Image (cartoon, rainbow, N blue to C red):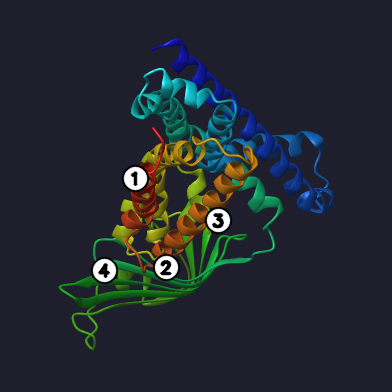
Amino acid sequence: MTILDRYIIKKILSTFFYVVLILVAIITVIDLTEKIDKFSVNNLSTTQVLGYYGDFIPWIAGLISPITVFISIVYVTSRMAAHTEIIAILSSGVSFKRLLVPYFVAALIIGSLSFYLNGWVIPKSNQERLVFEMQYFKKNNLYSRANIHMQIEPNVYLFIQNYNNQSNTGYQFSLERFRENRLVEKLSAENIQWDTLKHKWTLRIWKRKLVDSIFQVRPTSFVAKFGTSGYELDTMLSISPKDFEANDRGYDGMTIDELNNHIRKMRFRGSTGVEIYEVEKHIRFATPFTIFVLVFMGVIVSSKKSRGGTGFQIALGFMLSFVFILFFTMTRTFAEAGSLPPFLAAWLPNSVFTIISLGMYKYVPR
């Protein structure tokens, strides 16, 4: 690695962390302004607020890292071009491809750090942030979920019409067991509530029917012992209140390993909304490559000396950032709605902007 490589890498990294610091500070001040009333209403201490932003800041920094890389590259390269450093480097016999090497080394450093932090470190702090927001900002959302359908065991399906996340109580509960696509057992209740002492679910005003066919009831030892209905019954269902949590952006608190496990569990249970978690998983793997694509595009956009100074190139960089964010948001929205495969949604922006960058590369002065 030459002195020139180290010079460029140092400028990129220092500018990147500076831009992250500035943007995070601005976003934090705006967020604090919006939430100051909620902090006052809940009588939160300064320590609690600082603890919340201790978890909030790393999350925001990880979220904006690809765009801040692009802005940093455009700024550093346009400044070098304005000072004729790019021209001097190319005139000395260094090819444009060779010039890209320190940029890609810096992208590798930032991308690796981003992948590790967003994949395993930041989700751990997000767990506390999500709990804080649920406790103080969204505590009035009584019915967190409605019309819950899930498979809890092979051929065993659960339905709850409404679930209250404050009291851990579900209403209009039913549990159906099938064998060879035929209903053989049905258990229903007016409500089901989690007993925190017994760590069991308690059914109230319940009925149970076991059938050979949809019309013929068959007696069992359970029916002989408990009857076919009753007021209260303890159960050993293989679910817990955590399975009914409905946190917004709950995937933010999951590591990549936890995302994989959660996706497998949701697919087994036949739960809706699994696309949201699949998109998030693919995005975490695609983000390091996004950084490489944006670095490549940033160098191409800003390596040519502009008569109007660096202002136009920086403005162009912001415009391309906006287009990328808009395109990325659209593909993610379509994937979460089930209109686009999650893998395609995560990688399509990278693919499209790579093609655009390669097209622009042909016209870069060498």
In the displayed structure image, the side of residue 322 where residue 212 appears, left or right: left
- Nearer the camera: disc 3 or disc 1: 1
Q: CA distance from mark 1 to mark 4?
A: 72 Å
Write the residue at 70% across / 55% down: 137
Callouts 2 and 3 close, C-beta under 8 Å: no
Residue 337 is labelled as 2
The kind of residue tagged 1 is Leu
Callouts 4 and 2 close, C-beta under 8 Å: no
From this view, report whether residue 267 is shown above or below residue 130: below
Q: CA distance from mark 4 to mark 3?
A: 41 Å
Which residue carries the number 4 mark? 221
Q: Quadrant of the C terminus?
A: top left
The kind of residue tagged 4 is Ser
- Nearer the camera: disc 2 or disc 1: 1
Q: Position of residue 260 (x, y in %)?
A: 34, 46
Camera-nearest residue between 32 and 319:
319
Which residue carries the number 3 mark? 247
- Nearer the camera: disc 4 or disc 3: 3
